Image (cartoon, grey):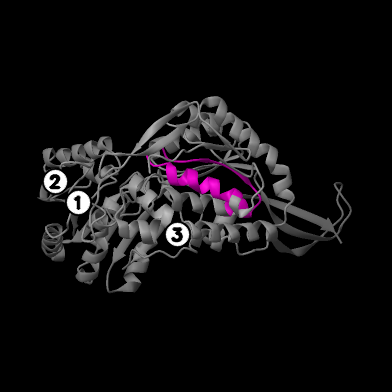
Amino acid sequence: MTDRDYHLLIGGEHVVADATYDVVNPSTEQVVGSAPDASVQQAQDACRAAKDASAAWVRTSMEERCALLARYAEVWDAHRDELVPLVQAETGATMRVAKTMQVPQVGARFRRYAQVESNLVPLNPAVMPSTALAPGGIIGGVEHRAPIGVVAALAAYNFPVTNMAGKVAPALAMGNTVVIKPPVQDPLAVIRMGELFAEAGFPPGVVNVVSASTVEAAEAITTSPDVDMISFTGSTGVGCRIAEVAGTQMKRLLLELGGKGAAIVFDDADLKNVISNVSSTWTFHSGQICTSPTRVIVQRGVYDEVVGKLTAMAGHLKVGDPLERDTVIGPVITGAHRDRVEALIRTAAAQGATLAAGGTRPEIETGFYVGPTLVVDATNDMTVAREEAFGPVITVIPFDTEDEAIAIANDSPYGLYDYVFSEDTGRAMAVAKLLQAGNIGINTLQRNHEAAFGGFKYSGIGRDGGSWGLHAYSEMQSIVWRG
């Protein structure tokens, strides 16, 4: 893969960056390819190109825009055999995840937003009396969902193309132009994603792609006066910085940030179902998922049984080469991130928790591997219960009463995705309504992609998903008239 050249996409032109940097396979530590490293000026040029293309794109009908989205899905799928190995190599995902959750979901998301939805919401007429302001009459009205303008889309490294598709497709459907900033760690497939828009027939400048390794180039995009909205998925620290710099220009924001998902397990829960769901923190993309149930809050009546079952499972999960069919846990994204996760595990032990599983680095010569780690005898004030590991680390905390469980779950700076496990679904629903999280799963980690998705507190601002995604990338415009 290293023999392919990758370029910036600015105004429909493939532009050679001023520099490049190496993208490393997290499993082999070999170079996958060289990514273009844009300068500040090139980042600004991309924003200007998107602005220049905006006027014509806004005037393109939604039907035409959606037809192009449908065409893009076909083009993307036609390149599947090329894209799967590229995505797998730069993300370190197991082949199963690359084949099922990474590449195919891009086409699925573009097809979802290729469905034409009216951007007009009629209002009931209002009978208004004459005033000093205006004559009376029957005043009609409609809410119009208007495009925002230029959207800067910055995706997370765990699912770079899938996450980017969830931003770009609804933004384009609503009539916005976009500047794509791929994640630094694995930008190559996102760059390829940008190249395919021309093949699908999109006009030049509607989609622009700027990869860069520097903070300066990224902030040139987020602070550009040509950018009207920033859609970012990633760490809370970076999200807070984006909100800070965007606030001075009143840019619209959609921020999906960190999570520290709490899974409340009552003593009447189906424990087989609990273990199957909770262990996804280990088994799904090495725990690099912001929605993972990383804090398992277990009622004391089943605490020992849950800990025992999780401990046993950890010992049977293969850590290793993500290309091997029986591998369950592949690498984390970089050596620096592995070091951070390991430091968090060491801190847990130093603060008095017990490592029931894991705690030592897997004996694999190359790659950035962290074994499945189970932290027990923990309290919610420990660092491992407060900070997002973004790796295969589960922390188990006991509770006695329902109120105590709710208090522990809510005692977090995050509020993205929580879970409740109980055979009493009425109680589970009542508890769910008291949790300070944007999303709650009852007895399942499965998603409903039409549901609004986003977080409370430091987990972000705004909602997308389904039709909510169209709302996220539009402004509400009230239009009224006198009958």
Q: Position of residue 319 (x, y in %)?
A: 18, 52
- The quadrant in which the C terminus is found is bottom right
Q: Is residue 46 visible?
A: yes
Q: Is residue 177 magenta?
A: yes
Residue 362, disc: 2
Q: Position of residue 324 (x, y in %)?
A: 23, 57
Residue 320, disc: 1
Q: How would you rate the neighbour count of disc 2 (Cα within 10 Å): few for under 14, some for 14-19, many for 20 or more?
A: some
Alpha-carbon span between mark 3 and mark 1: 25 Å
Q: Residue at x 58, y 50 (%)?
A: 197
Indicate the secondary structure of the residue bearing disc 2.
loop
In the image, which residues are magenta? Answer: 170-198
Left or right position of 162 against 336: right
Alpha-carbon span between mark 1 and mark 2: 9 Å
Residue 310, disc: none
- The quadrant in which the N terminus is found is top left
